[in-house]
Amino acid sequence: MSSSEIPKTINGLKIILGMAGIGDPSSPSCRFPNVEATKELLIAFARRGYRDLDTARNYPPGKPETCEPMMGEALESLQKDADVVKGVPFIIDTKLRFAPPNTHSKEMVEKSIDGSLKALKMEKLHVEYLHGYDETSPIPETCKAMDKAYKEGKFEKFGISNASADVLEQFFETCEAEGLEVKPQVYQGDYSVLSRDCEGKLLDTCRKHGMPYYAYSPAGGGLMNSKAYRERQGGRFDNSNRLGQIYRNQHYKDHLIEAAEKVRELASANGLSGHVLALRWAVWHSKLSEKHGDGIILGASSIEQLNANLDAIESGPLPDTIVHAIEDIWSAAKAKAQQKPQL
């Protein structure tokens, strides 16, 4: 593979590796607990022809600010390894520290960005995201702080994650009214075969403003796994940690659990796992597109799973019969969700 073919895209989509499993081993989400394990993960990803990485000050869940330093140590040597990077360095996106007592105030925006740059041993980030919408910080203050950091050359693109379409519009209106140089340029949000609320107003808003949509949890947010596996300690729906509680609130609904079971049965009947089916649907059959510069963020609990996930999305589209069956399952799930309880 020549350097001109790196980073690879699949069906025109950017493929990004999520780094939430890296950091302090006491985090229930940690799968890569030291620099050497992190380097092995990055090398495996790079050797498949990919370079884009997604992290956050909050990673890993429960032990924030321990992922980026570990990444920084790993990247410092790998970026200089010609056999690994082949002239195409890794591309790093990160997100501001966010969760009380952290806010998106001017001071904390600056502190978080500078903290990321120092931890990652970088002079400039590719995308700096607001990691959600902070209602306690005035939008003009946050936008001005991001504009200042952009003008200082600290990041290339202003990203927003996990905000509603209406909030996104408020950010655009504020940046325009304040005459700021940088406006939101990338959106990151949940999107999968069983999480498709973004397909309406949110995606329309992103398209209106020319924002690529980077989809996280493309394999279904853990719903494609068995109940015992997804509820295990450290699992996606572990109710003992904050992230597990968030995922439960988003995905643990009767109509989605029932739909997930039907999708798994459909996958099994066609010789696939629900996980693989969901990944292939996200890359080949969702509303994400090359035209809009969209991408997906893959997770991996091991190098073996990373390679299996990449094999899945590289294997091409699903048969039409499966795609049509998925749409039938989704339509039924939506109808059930909209039913009013009988009094």
Image: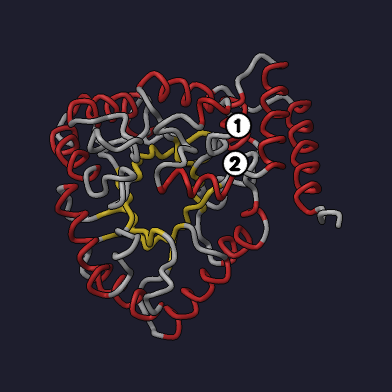
Please give the name of the residue rendered at 48% of the width and 25% of the height, measured from the top-left corner: 309
Please give the name of the residue rendered at 39% of the width and 33% of the height, measured from the top-left corner: 234
Give the labeled residue for mark 2.
192
Image quarter of residue 40: top left
Please give the name of the residue rendered at 49% of the width and 21% of the height, measured from the top-left corner: 311
Please give the name of the residue rendered at 16% of the width and 29% of the height, measured from the top-left corner: 81
Q: Of residues 158 and 220, which is closer to you in this image?
A: 220
* Residue 112, position as x, y percentages in the image: 23, 61
Please identify the quadrant where the N terminus is shown: top left
Disc 2: CA contacts within 10 A as few (<14), some (14-19) or many (>=20): many
Q: Of residues 289 and 199, which is closer to you in this image?
A: 199
Residue type indicated by callout 1: Ala
* Residue 287, position as x, y percentages in the image: 64, 46
* Residue 306, position as x, y percentages in the image: 41, 25
Chain-order first, disc 1 or disc 2: 2
Q: Of residues 242 and 256, which is closer to you in this image?
A: 242
User: 157 left or right of 230?
Assistant: left
Give the labeled residue for mark 1.
278
